[in-house]
């Protein structure tokens, strides 16, 4: 073949999503499979979103509203922003890709911490943009001094990505440190570096020292905030997310955004979900209970974990069991439980567990205990 594929595409390692339930059923010939792998909402979709979806079906022959007027305005009303400050994306992933494509060119760089959400470096590389990484501290939290250093030292860094809390670690950076960092970055190269703060898990946060993204938006002109309908609203399959920033930041982005980036169902479902307070409250309760369940169980089994602000928990199987995350993942798959190995984040020792329903959590824990070699009793400890 004589087709030319750019080097940065040829060498790109694509994103590996959580293993789908159906694929696991097919591969292992098991009927009951539970998935605790993709930080989805275990309660399913928001009922209000489902109702809106049913209602819009009669309009499926129409193109969706390219301006996403209703959804944009619903978000703006809720967050007390101007609608021009909202950019709707086909999942927040699309917003990540759009800002990189708008604000960086081939050969430029993004900066992000080690073990940051992999969509950032992947979207960057897909556009010929490289990634520089900063260190994490011993607790797997982003070291913001180091992130500032790599941003300053690498002239071609145009954007910084920071998820707060981060996926897959669940760790967060506190308000004061983040504000200090943002103030410093706004002085780098004449304030031309954009900081994308990914708040995909914001609704789950319980720590009081985690910055309110809306306040950061008000105080720092170079900040973009990402939010999503995929987590607390239970709409991962619909693909709807958004970015919040000053209107000037979105103006060039809107030029490259495809007009019908969200289908009509996603627009209607997301708008309705935004208003589904009862569902959000239920999801928060189930998550808090599930988080406690796993924290308690892991502690009892001697498996250390990183305290998480999201709807998932990262645990250290190497320290707890003397096994790698990939080993436990494979063994649990055979028992019909899908966890998430995080080897591609450089965390060979760890496994990420998404919080499920009480029943899913119990089944997941049972599988973990069984694969550790001491069914029904205690997990095998590291020799
Ligand atoms: C930190 C973070 N940002 C963004 C996303 C992507 O969300 P979306 O489904 O809106 O594309 C995820 C999904 O897991 C995530 O963990």
Image (tube, rainbow, N blue to C red):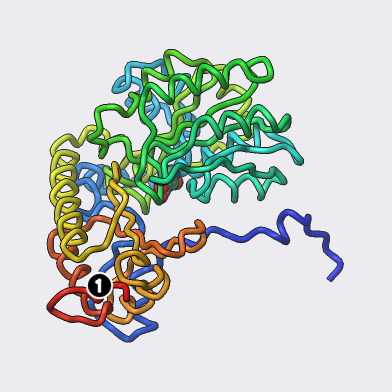
Res 27 seen here: yes
Res 239 seen here: no
Q: Nearer the viewer, residue 282 or 120?
A: 120
308 up-or-down from 33: above or below:
above
Q: Quadrant of the N terminus?
A: bottom right
Identify the residue at the far bottom of this view. 29
Residue 382: x and y, percent? 31, 73
Q: 293 left or right of 239?
A: left
Q: Residues within 10 Å of mark 1 (few under 14, many from 20)?
A: many
- Local secondary structure at mark 1: helix
> At x 40% / y 47%, what residue is drawn?
167
Identify the residue at the far front of this view. 383
Residue 65: x and y, percent? 45, 34
> At x 17% / y 53%, what residue is drawn?
290
> At x 48% / y 63%, what residue is drawn?
343
* Residue 77, picture quadrant: top left
Q: Nearer the viewer, residue 39 or 177?
A: 177
> At x 36% / y 76%, what residue is drawn?
24
Q: Which residue is mark 1?
A: 368
Q: Nearer the viewer, residue 300 or 272?
A: 300
Q: 304 left or right of 300?
A: right
82 up-or-down from 27: above or below:
above
Identify the residue at the far right of this view. 2
């Amino acid at each position: 073949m004589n087709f030319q594929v750019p080097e940065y595409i040829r060498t790109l390692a694509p994103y590996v999503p959580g293993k789908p339930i159906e694929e696991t059923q097919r591969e292992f010939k098991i009927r009951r499979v539970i998935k605790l792998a993709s930080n989805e909402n275990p309660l399913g979709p928001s009922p209000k979103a489902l109702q809106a979806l049913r209602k819009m079906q009669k309009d499926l022959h129409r193109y969706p509203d390219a301006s996403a007027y209703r959804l944009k305005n619903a978000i703006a009303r809720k967050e007390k922003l101007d609608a021009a400050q909202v950019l709707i994306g086909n999942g927040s992933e699309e917003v990540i890709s759009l800002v990189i494509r708008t604000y960086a060119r081939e050969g430029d760089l993004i900066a992000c911490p080690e073990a940051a959400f992999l969509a950032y470096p992947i979207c960057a590389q897909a556009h010929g943009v490289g990634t520089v990484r900063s260190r994490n501290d011993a607790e797997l939290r982003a070291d913001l001094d180091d992130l500032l250093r790599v941003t300053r030292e690498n002239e071609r860094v145009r954007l910084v990505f920071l998820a707060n809390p981060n996926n897959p670690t669940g760790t967060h950076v506190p308000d004061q440190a983040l504000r200090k960092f943002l103030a410093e970055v706004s002085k780098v190269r004449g304030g031309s570096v954009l900081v994308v703060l990914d708040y995909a898990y914001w609704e789950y946060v319980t720590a009081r020292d985690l910055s309110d993204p809306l306040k950061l938006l008000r105080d720092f002109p170079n900040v973009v905030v990402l939010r999503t309908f995929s987590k607390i609203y239970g709409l991962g399959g619909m693909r709807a997310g958004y970015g919040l920033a000053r209107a000037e930041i979105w103006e060039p982005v809107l030029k490259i955004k495809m007009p019908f980036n969200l289908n009509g169902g996603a627009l209607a479902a997301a708008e309705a979900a935004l208003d589904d307070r009862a569902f959000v409250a239920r999801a928060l309760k189930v998550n808090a209970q599930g988080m406690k369940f796993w924290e308690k169980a892991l502690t009892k089994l001697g498996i250390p974990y990183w305290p998480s602000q999201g709807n998932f928990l990262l645990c250290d199987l190497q320290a707890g069991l003397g096994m790698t995350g990939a080993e436990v993942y494979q063994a649990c798959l055979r028992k019909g439980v899908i966890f998430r190995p995080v080897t591609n984040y450089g965390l060979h020792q760890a496994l990420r567990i998404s919080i499920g329903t009480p029943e899913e959590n119990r089944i997941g824990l049972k599988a973990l205990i069984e694969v550790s070699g001491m069914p029904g009793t205690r997990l095998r400890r590291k020799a």
